[in-house]
Image (tube, rainbow, N blue to C red):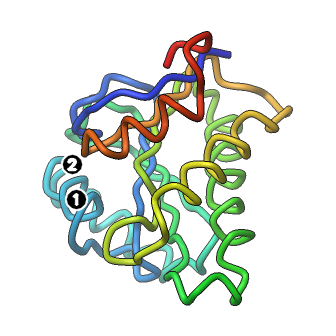
Amino acid sequence: MLIIAERADITTLAVDAIVNAANCSLLGGGGVDGAIHRAAGRELLESCRKFGGCPTGEARITPGFKLPAKFVIHTPGPVWGGGTRGEAALLASCYRNSLRLAAEAGCRSIAFPCISTGVYRFPAEAAAKIAVDTVRSWTENLPEKVVFACFSSASLEIYRRLLGAGEGA
């Protein structure tokens, strides 16, 4: 499995699935969530309405509609509350459940944003470590390629350091 980090707009990546750092309503919002909904078109919103929401740490899958990606996997990350409310376990669950849905859909490549590090205030370094560790420890139906799509150069630097030079970072 190739695991890489790159500075990218996740809505433009030609991978089998992109992950949406969604809110629990799945009906769009700000940040990456809003960008994905805008780029995918109205059909994404209509598809998401059918779920009636999604609990934090779980995931749901929809078609990508107008996106280059075939699928969008929506996962609501935890809001940071100081680290004493199970945030780390919930964030790891976001990555595991997203990988599970990607495997079930036959995806060979997947791209993740920096889940929960925007308005949900999860510390970027801790979130990146959870993301990398969770993906590395995933043993079921591995995708051939995992991309950590970083919106900022600061996030990219964190992921590249955690991945190390020998892993496609």
Taking the spot 29% from the left edge, 28% from the top edge, the residue there is: 13
Q: Residue 44 appears at what percent x and percent y? A: 29, 58
Q: Residue 74 appears at what percent x and percent y? A: 47, 59
The answer to which image quadrant residue 155 occupies is top left
Taking the spot 29% from the left edge, 63% from the top edge, the residue there is: 33
> Which numbered dot is residue 53?
none
Taking the spot 58% from the left edge, 23% from the top edge, the residue there is: 3
- Mark 1, Cα crowd under 10 Å, few <14 / some 14-19 / many 20+, is many
- Mark 2, Cα crowd under 10 Å, few <14 / some 14-19 / many 20+, is many
> Which numbered dot is residue 40?
2
- Mark-to-mark CA distance, 2 and 1: 5 Å
Residue 8 vertical position relative to residue 145 in the rendered view, above or below = below
Q: Residue 169 appears at what percent x and percent y? A: 49, 19
Q: Which of 137 and 139 lies nearest the eye of the viewer?
A: 137
Left or right of 90, for residue 51: left
Count of numbered badges drawn on the protein: 2
Q: Secondary structure at mark 2?
A: helix
Q: Amino acid at mark 1?
A: His
Q: Amino acid at mark 2?
A: Ala
Q: Secondary structure at mark 1?
A: helix
> Which numbered dot is residue 37?
1
